[in-house]
Amino acid sequence: MCDRACELMISCCSVVCKVCCRYMSAKVAFLIQFLVYGIFQGFNVATDAALFVELFKTQRRCSNMTSSPFHCTSFTPGNSSSTLKKLLEDHVDTLEVLEYSMMLVMGVGAAIYIVHMIILIPNLCKNFHDPDIALEVEGKVAPRYYQNITITHCMFMVLESIIHDIPASCLAMEISVHFWGKNDVNCWECSPITEPLPKEQSLSNTKLWLALMITGIGLLALYKGLMPLYFWVGNPFCWSCYFLRFFMVMPAGFIYALLILTPCMGVAALRVIPAVPSLKDEIGGTADTFWSIGLVFWVLIFICFITYFCCKRTIMDLCPCLAWCEEPKSRNKEEKKAGCICF
Protein backbone atom coordinates (compact mmCIF):
# COMPACT_ATOMS: atom_id res chain seq x y z
CA MET A 1 0.00 0.00 0.00
CA CYS A 2 2.79 2.38 0.96
CA ASP A 3 4.73 1.48 -2.18
CA ARG A 4 1.75 2.32 -4.36
CA ALA A 5 1.26 5.60 -2.54
CA CYS A 6 4.92 6.49 -3.07
CA GLU A 7 4.71 5.57 -6.75
CA LEU A 8 1.60 7.72 -7.11
CA MET A 9 3.32 10.68 -5.43
CA ILE A 10 6.40 10.27 -7.61
CA SER A 11 4.30 10.11 -10.77
CA CYS A 12 2.32 13.20 -9.70
CA CYS A 13 5.55 15.10 -8.99
CA SER A 14 6.90 14.01 -12.35
CA VAL A 15 3.82 15.32 -14.14
CA VAL A 16 3.97 18.62 -12.23
CA CYS A 17 7.66 19.04 -13.07
CA LYS A 18 7.02 18.32 -16.74
CA VAL A 19 4.30 20.94 -16.85
CA CYS A 20 5.90 23.62 -14.65
CA CYS A 21 9.57 23.14 -15.51
CA ARG A 22 9.25 22.91 -19.24
CA TYR A 23 11.85 24.81 -21.23
CA MET A 24 10.74 28.31 -22.23
CA SER A 25 12.70 30.31 -24.77
CA ALA A 26 13.79 33.86 -24.03
CA LYS A 27 11.46 35.06 -26.78
CA VAL A 28 8.38 33.67 -25.03
CA ALA A 29 9.58 34.89 -21.62
CA PHE A 30 10.14 38.40 -22.98
CA LEU A 31 6.67 38.40 -24.55
CA ILE A 32 5.04 37.28 -21.28
CA GLN A 33 6.83 40.03 -19.33
CA PHE A 34 5.68 42.58 -21.90
CA LEU A 35 2.04 41.45 -21.76
CA VAL A 36 1.87 41.33 -17.94
CA TYR A 37 3.36 44.79 -17.58
CA GLY A 38 1.34 46.28 -20.44
CA ILE A 39 -2.00 45.00 -19.11
CA PHE A 40 -1.44 45.97 -15.45
CA GLN A 41 0.00 49.43 -16.11
CA GLY A 42 -2.55 50.10 -18.83
CA PHE A 43 -5.34 49.18 -16.40
CA ASN A 44 -3.98 51.69 -13.87
CA VAL A 45 -3.81 54.48 -16.44
CA ALA A 46 -7.34 53.66 -17.61
CA THR A 47 -8.58 53.77 -13.99
CA ASP A 48 -6.99 57.21 -13.61
CA ALA A 49 -8.81 58.39 -16.73
CA ALA A 50 -12.15 56.99 -15.52
CA LEU A 51 -11.80 58.64 -12.11
CA PHE A 52 -10.84 61.94 -13.77
CA VAL A 53 -13.95 61.78 -15.99
CA GLU A 54 -16.07 61.11 -12.89
CA LEU A 55 -14.60 64.16 -11.13
CA PHE A 56 -14.88 66.34 -14.24
CA LYS A 57 -18.57 65.59 -14.83
CA THR A 58 -19.52 65.93 -11.17
CA GLN A 59 -17.59 69.17 -10.67
CA ARG A 60 -19.16 70.79 -13.75
CA ARG A 61 -22.68 69.68 -12.81
CA CYS A 62 -22.23 70.86 -9.24
CA SER A 63 -20.77 74.20 -10.34
CA ASN A 64 -23.88 74.88 -12.43
CA MET A 65 -26.07 73.85 -9.50
CA THR A 66 -24.78 76.62 -7.20
CA SER A 67 -26.48 79.30 -9.31
CA SER A 68 -29.98 77.92 -8.63
CA PRO A 69 -31.90 76.42 -5.68
CA PHE A 70 -30.87 72.86 -4.85
CA HIS A 71 -31.48 70.13 -2.31
CA CYS A 72 -29.35 67.26 -0.99
CA THR A 73 -30.00 63.69 0.07
CA SER A 74 -28.66 64.21 3.59
CA PHE A 75 -30.12 67.56 4.55
CA THR A 76 -29.49 69.08 7.97
CA PRO A 77 -32.49 71.27 8.91
CA GLY A 78 -30.32 73.48 11.12
CA ASN A 79 -28.36 74.78 8.13
CA SER A 80 -29.75 77.75 6.23
CA SER A 81 -29.87 77.77 2.44
CA SER A 82 -27.07 80.35 2.28
CA THR A 83 -24.88 78.18 4.51
CA LEU A 84 -25.54 75.10 2.39
CA LYS A 85 -24.77 77.09 -0.76
CA LYS A 86 -21.46 78.26 0.72
CA LEU A 87 -20.60 74.68 1.71
CA LEU A 88 -21.44 73.43 -1.76
CA GLU A 89 -19.31 76.15 -3.38
CA ASP A 90 -16.39 75.18 -1.14
CA HIS A 91 -16.91 71.57 -2.16
CA VAL A 92 -16.87 72.55 -5.83
CA ASP A 93 -13.58 74.42 -5.33
CA THR A 94 -12.04 71.41 -3.59
CA LEU A 95 -13.18 69.07 -6.35
CA GLU A 96 -11.62 71.41 -8.92
CA VAL A 97 -8.24 71.19 -7.17
CA LEU A 98 -8.53 67.39 -6.99
CA GLU A 99 -9.57 67.30 -10.65
CA TYR A 100 -6.48 69.19 -11.83
CA SER A 101 -4.26 67.13 -9.54
CA MET A 102 -5.70 63.93 -10.99
CA MET A 103 -5.24 65.26 -14.52
CA LEU A 104 -1.57 66.01 -13.79
CA VAL A 105 -0.89 62.58 -12.29
CA MET A 106 -2.81 60.86 -15.09
CA GLY A 107 -0.95 62.84 -17.77
CA VAL A 108 2.49 62.13 -16.33
CA GLY A 109 1.65 58.45 -15.78
CA ALA A 110 0.26 58.07 -19.30
CA ALA A 111 3.29 59.82 -20.82
CA ILE A 112 5.76 57.55 -19.02
CA TYR A 113 3.68 54.50 -19.93
CA ILE A 114 3.61 55.47 -23.62
CA VAL A 115 7.37 56.14 -23.71
CA HIS A 116 7.99 52.83 -21.93
CA MET A 117 5.84 50.95 -24.46
CA ILE A 118 7.54 52.74 -27.36
CA ILE A 119 10.85 51.40 -26.04
CA LEU A 120 9.57 47.88 -25.40
CA ILE A 121 7.58 47.25 -28.60
CA PRO A 122 10.48 47.73 -31.10
CA ASN A 123 12.69 45.56 -28.90
CA LEU A 124 9.96 42.93 -28.82
CA CYS A 125 9.85 42.95 -32.62
CA LYS A 126 13.64 42.79 -32.78
CA ASN A 127 13.55 39.90 -30.33
CA PHE A 128 11.43 37.83 -32.76
CA HIS A 129 12.80 38.92 -36.15
CA ASP A 130 16.51 39.69 -35.74
CA PRO A 131 18.47 36.48 -36.62
CA ASP A 132 21.54 37.56 -34.62
CA ILE A 133 19.47 38.04 -31.47
CA ALA A 134 17.74 34.71 -32.09
CA LEU A 135 21.11 32.93 -32.05
CA GLU A 136 22.35 34.70 -28.93
CA VAL A 137 19.34 34.36 -26.65
CA GLU A 138 19.45 30.59 -26.44
CA GLY A 139 22.70 30.64 -24.45
CA LYS A 140 22.88 30.16 -20.70
CA VAL A 141 24.28 33.67 -20.28
CA ALA A 142 22.03 36.49 -21.42
CA PRO A 143 23.57 38.79 -24.05
CA ARG A 144 24.34 42.43 -23.40
CA TYR A 145 21.20 43.34 -25.32
CA TYR A 146 18.94 41.63 -22.78
CA GLN A 147 20.86 43.04 -19.84
CA ASN A 148 20.35 46.58 -21.13
CA ILE A 149 16.65 46.21 -21.95
CA THR A 150 15.95 44.59 -18.57
CA ILE A 151 17.74 47.37 -16.67
CA THR A 152 15.83 49.98 -18.71
CA HIS A 153 12.55 48.18 -17.99
CA CYS A 154 13.29 48.12 -14.25
CA MET A 155 14.27 51.81 -14.18
CA PHE A 156 11.02 52.80 -15.88
CA MET A 157 8.98 50.69 -13.46
CA VAL A 158 10.61 52.33 -10.43
CA LEU A 159 10.02 55.76 -11.99
CA GLU A 160 6.36 54.92 -12.59
CA SER A 161 5.96 53.76 -8.99
CA ILE A 162 7.36 57.00 -7.57
CA ILE A 163 5.83 59.50 -10.00
CA HIS A 164 2.50 57.82 -10.74
CA ASP A 165 1.49 54.87 -8.54
CA ILE A 166 2.05 56.48 -5.12
CA PRO A 167 0.45 59.89 -5.97
CA ALA A 168 -2.49 58.25 -7.79
CA SER A 169 -3.32 55.93 -4.88
CA CYS A 170 -3.07 58.79 -2.36
CA LEU A 171 -5.33 60.96 -4.53
CA ALA A 172 -7.88 58.14 -4.74
CA MET A 173 -7.96 58.01 -0.93
CA GLU A 174 -8.36 61.79 -0.66
CA ILE A 175 -11.12 61.81 -3.27
CA SER A 176 -12.96 59.09 -1.35
CA VAL A 177 -13.18 61.49 1.62
CA HIS A 178 -15.00 64.00 -0.58
CA PHE A 179 -17.49 61.41 -1.80
CA TRP A 180 -19.03 61.91 1.66
CA GLY A 181 -18.88 65.70 1.57
CA LYS A 182 -18.81 68.03 4.54
CA ASN A 183 -21.73 68.90 6.82
CA ASP A 184 -24.10 66.75 4.72
CA VAL A 185 -23.21 68.47 1.44
CA ASN A 186 -21.46 66.77 -1.44
CA CYS A 187 -21.84 67.12 -5.18
CA TRP A 188 -22.77 63.50 -5.80
CA GLU A 189 -25.91 63.64 -3.65
CA CYS A 190 -27.28 67.09 -4.45
CA SER A 191 -29.48 68.12 -7.37
CA PRO A 192 -31.49 71.16 -8.53
CA ILE A 193 -34.74 71.64 -6.66
CA THR A 194 -36.68 70.81 -9.85
CA GLU A 195 -35.12 67.34 -10.08
CA PRO A 196 -35.60 64.33 -7.78
CA LEU A 197 -32.97 63.59 -5.16
CA PRO A 198 -30.23 61.21 -6.33
CA LYS A 199 -29.65 57.89 -4.65
CA GLU A 200 -27.00 57.55 -1.95
CA GLN A 201 -23.66 57.17 -3.76
CA SER A 202 -21.01 57.79 -1.12
CA LEU A 203 -20.48 54.18 -0.05
CA SER A 204 -20.72 52.71 -3.56
CA ASN A 205 -18.32 55.31 -5.03
CA THR A 206 -15.82 54.82 -2.22
CA LYS A 207 -15.81 51.03 -2.54
CA LEU A 208 -15.66 51.10 -6.35
CA TRP A 209 -12.76 53.49 -6.84
CA LEU A 210 -10.71 52.33 -3.87
CA ALA A 211 -11.09 48.71 -4.98
CA LEU A 212 -10.04 49.53 -8.55
CA MET A 213 -7.09 51.76 -7.64
CA ILE A 214 -5.66 49.74 -4.75
CA THR A 215 -6.10 46.36 -6.46
CA GLY A 216 -4.53 47.54 -9.71
CA ILE A 217 -1.59 49.32 -8.08
CA GLY A 218 -1.08 46.49 -5.56
CA LEU A 219 -0.88 43.78 -8.25
CA LEU A 220 1.40 45.92 -10.40
CA ALA A 221 3.68 46.67 -7.43
CA LEU A 222 3.83 42.94 -6.68
CA TYR A 223 5.00 42.30 -10.25
CA LYS A 224 7.50 45.17 -10.16
CA GLY A 225 8.99 43.90 -6.91
CA LEU A 226 9.52 40.28 -7.92
CA MET A 227 10.38 40.69 -11.62
CA PRO A 228 14.00 41.97 -11.32
CA LEU A 229 14.99 39.26 -8.83
CA TYR A 230 13.17 36.61 -10.87
CA PHE A 231 15.58 37.20 -13.75
CA TRP A 232 18.62 36.52 -11.60
CA VAL A 233 17.39 33.54 -9.54
CA GLY A 234 18.95 30.30 -10.69
CA ASN A 235 22.35 31.63 -11.71
CA PRO A 236 24.60 30.30 -13.02
CA PHE A 237 22.37 27.51 -14.36
CA CYS A 238 19.19 29.46 -15.12
CA TRP A 239 16.68 27.04 -13.65
CA SER A 240 13.75 26.24 -15.87
CA CYS A 241 11.46 25.63 -12.87
CA TYR A 242 9.62 28.91 -13.27
CA PHE A 243 7.11 28.30 -10.49
CA LEU A 244 9.91 27.57 -8.02
CA ARG A 245 11.75 30.75 -8.99
CA PHE A 246 8.47 32.67 -8.78
CA PHE A 247 7.77 31.54 -5.22
CA MET A 248 11.37 32.20 -4.17
CA VAL A 249 11.16 35.87 -5.13
CA MET A 250 7.54 36.37 -4.03
CA PRO A 251 8.57 37.91 -0.64
CA ALA A 252 10.40 40.68 -2.52
CA GLY A 253 7.21 41.41 -4.43
CA PHE A 254 5.16 41.62 -1.24
CA ILE A 255 7.69 43.98 0.38
CA TYR A 256 7.72 46.25 -2.67
CA ALA A 257 3.91 46.28 -2.79
CA LEU A 258 3.87 47.13 0.93
CA LEU A 259 6.23 50.07 0.33
CA ILE A 260 4.18 51.43 -2.58
CA LEU A 261 0.86 51.12 -0.71
CA THR A 262 2.15 52.57 2.58
CA PRO A 263 1.52 56.27 1.70
CA CYS A 264 -2.06 55.72 0.53
CA MET A 265 -2.80 53.52 3.55
CA GLY A 266 -1.46 56.35 5.70
CA VAL A 267 -3.96 58.69 4.02
CA ALA A 268 -6.68 56.11 4.66
CA ALA A 269 -5.79 55.79 8.36
CA LEU A 270 -5.35 59.53 8.97
CA ARG A 271 -7.96 61.02 6.62
CA VAL A 272 -10.56 58.53 5.41
CA ILE A 273 -11.33 56.68 8.66
CA PRO A 274 -11.68 59.85 10.83
CA ALA A 275 -13.92 61.45 8.18
CA VAL A 276 -15.97 58.29 7.52
CA PRO A 277 -16.07 56.16 10.71
CA SER A 278 -18.47 53.70 9.08
CA LEU A 279 -15.59 52.44 6.89
CA LYS A 280 -13.46 51.50 9.88
CA ASP A 281 -14.70 47.91 9.96
CA GLU A 282 -13.94 47.43 6.26
CA ILE A 283 -10.55 49.09 5.72
CA GLY A 284 -9.50 50.32 9.16
CA GLY A 285 -7.52 47.23 10.19
CA THR A 286 -5.85 46.82 6.79
CA ALA A 287 -4.92 50.51 6.60
CA ASP A 288 -3.42 50.56 10.11
CA THR A 289 -1.42 47.37 9.47
CA PHE A 290 -0.01 48.52 6.12
CA TRP A 291 0.74 52.00 7.46
CA SER A 292 2.53 50.77 10.60
CA ILE A 293 4.64 48.04 8.98
CA GLY A 294 5.33 50.00 5.80
CA LEU A 295 6.45 53.05 7.75
CA VAL A 296 9.06 50.91 9.53
CA PHE A 297 10.42 49.69 6.17
CA TRP A 298 10.54 53.22 4.75
CA VAL A 299 12.43 54.49 7.82
CA LEU A 300 14.92 51.60 7.58
CA ILE A 301 15.48 52.25 3.86
CA PHE A 302 16.00 55.96 4.51
CA ILE A 303 18.49 55.28 7.33
CA CYS A 304 20.42 52.73 5.22
CA PHE A 305 20.49 55.09 2.24
CA ILE A 306 21.80 58.03 4.28
CA THR A 307 24.29 55.84 6.16
CA TYR A 308 25.69 54.33 2.98
CA PHE A 309 26.27 57.64 1.20
CA CYS A 310 27.61 59.37 4.30
CA CYS A 311 29.91 56.51 5.35
CA LYS A 312 30.54 54.87 1.98
CA ARG A 313 34.31 54.77 2.26
CA THR A 314 34.22 53.31 5.78
CA ILE A 315 31.70 50.66 4.77
CA MET A 316 33.82 49.62 1.79
CA ASP A 317 36.88 49.33 4.05
CA LEU A 318 35.01 47.22 6.60
CA CYS A 319 33.34 45.01 4.00
CA PRO A 320 35.53 44.53 0.91
CA CYS A 321 33.01 42.02 -0.42
CA LEU A 322 30.88 44.97 -1.57
CA ALA A 323 33.56 46.02 -4.05
CA TRP A 324 31.89 43.95 -6.77
CA CYS A 325 29.06 46.51 -6.80
CA GLU A 326 31.34 49.17 -8.23
CA GLU A 327 32.70 48.82 -11.73
CA PRO A 328 36.20 50.17 -12.39
CA LYS A 329 35.98 53.50 -14.18
CA SER A 330 38.92 52.63 -16.38
CA ARG A 331 37.10 49.73 -18.02
CA ASN A 332 35.73 50.52 -21.45
CA LYS A 333 32.16 49.65 -22.35
CA GLU A 334 33.40 47.21 -24.98
CA GLU A 335 35.19 45.20 -22.33
CA LYS A 336 32.12 44.69 -20.15
CA LYS A 337 31.01 41.10 -20.03
CA ALA A 338 27.47 40.01 -20.73
CA GLY A 339 25.19 39.85 -17.74
CA CYS A 340 23.69 36.65 -16.43
CA ILE A 341 19.95 37.08 -16.62
CA CYS A 342 17.66 34.06 -16.48
CA PHE A 343 14.42 34.12 -18.46
Image (spheres, grey):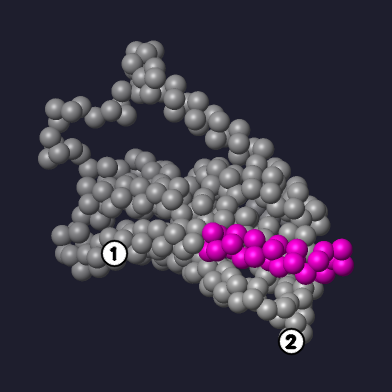
Question: Dot 2, crowdedness within 10 Å: few (<14), some or many (≥20)?
Answer: few
Q: Earlier in the sequence, mark 2 or mark 1?
A: 1
Q: Residue at x 50, y 31 (%)?
A: 301
Residue for point 48% across, 47% down: 225
Q: Quadrant of residue 64?
A: bottom right
Q: Is residue 167 magenta?
A: no
Q: Residue furthest front?
A: 82
The picture quadrant where one finds residue 61 is bottom right
Residue at which label 2 appears: 194
Q: Amino acid at mark 1?
A: Ile
Q: Is residue 57 above or below residue 284?
A: below
Mark 1 nearby-residue class (10 Å; few <14, some 14–19, many ≥20): few
* Residue 7 at x, y percent in the picture: 62, 56
In the rendering, at what x and y percent does residue 133 appear? 20, 59
Q: Is residue 308 in sight in this rendering? A: yes
- Which sits in the foreground, 143 or 221? 221
Q: Main secondary structure of the magenta part?
A: helix
Where is the N terminus found, in terms of image quarters? bottom right
Question: Which residue is most to the right?
Answer: 77
Say whether residue 153 is left or right of residue 193: left
Residue at coordinates 39% horizontally, 19% vertically from top-left? Answer: 310
Magenta span = 74-99
Please name the residue that numbered disc 1 is placed on: 118
